[in-house]
Amino acid sequence: MPDETKNPRGGSTVPYWSVDDVDAVRQRLLDAGCTHHRGPLQVVPGRKICQVVDPFGIVIGLDGP
């Protein structure tokens, strides 16, 4: 279920990067200065998504196993 308080419908476009390991890439981005935004969420068995915010305020999505 979308969290409308964190990313209002129509508020922005979120680019998603396809990655081999959502958890590892998410942690690497957090360690590099990004902040948590939402997720990780399992969208279907074997596939997760999450979002982080980079230091410039841009929301970035990760999609993968």
Image (cartoon, grey):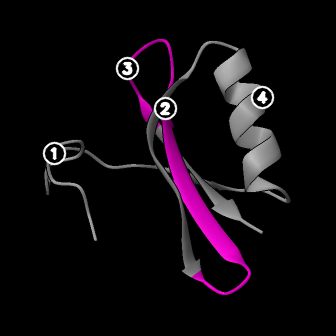
Give the Cα distance between marks 2 and 1.
18 Å
Earlier in the chain: of badge 1 and badge 4, it is 1
At horizontal 49% and vertical 32% (from top left) the residue drawn is: 36
In the image, is residue 20 above or below residue 42?
A: above
Quadrant into which the N terminus falls: bottom left
Q: Are marks 1 and 4 in contact (CB under 8 Å)?
A: no
**Circle 1 is placed at which residue position?**
11
Crowding at mark 1 (Cα within 10 Å: few <14, some 14-19, many 20+): few
- Verify whether residue 29 appears in magenta: no
Vertical position of residue 43 compared to residue 50: above or below: below
State which tag comes first along the sequence, 2 or 3: 2
Instruction: Give the structural element (helix, strand or loop) at label 2.
Output: strand
Residue appearing at x 65%, y 24% in the figure: 30
For the residues labelled 2 and 4, the Cα–Cα distance comes to: 12 Å
The mark that comes first in sequence, 2 or 1, is 1
Task: Relative to 30, say whether 17 is above or below.
Answer: below
Does label 2 or label 4 sit earlier along the sequence? 4
From the image, tell me which residue sits under label 4.
Answer: 28
User: In the picture shown, does residue 27 fall above or below 56?
Assistant: below
Q: With 2 as the anchor, is 9 left or right in this view?
A: left
The amino acid sitting under disc 2 is His
Q: Which residues are magenta?
A: 44-59
**Which amino acid is tagged 1?**
Gly
Residue depicted at x 83% and y 56% = 21
Of discs 2 and 3, which sits in the foreground?
2
Quarter of the image for residue 26 reads top right
Classed neighbour count for the residue bearing mark 2: other residues with Cα under 10 Å, few (<14), some (14–19), many (≥20): some
Q: CA distance from mark 2 to mark 3?
A: 11 Å
Q: Is residue 7 left or right of residue 37?
A: left
Q: Which amino acid, by three-letter code, is at mark 3? A: Gly
Q: Which residue is mark 3?
A: 57
* Residue linked to disc 2: 36
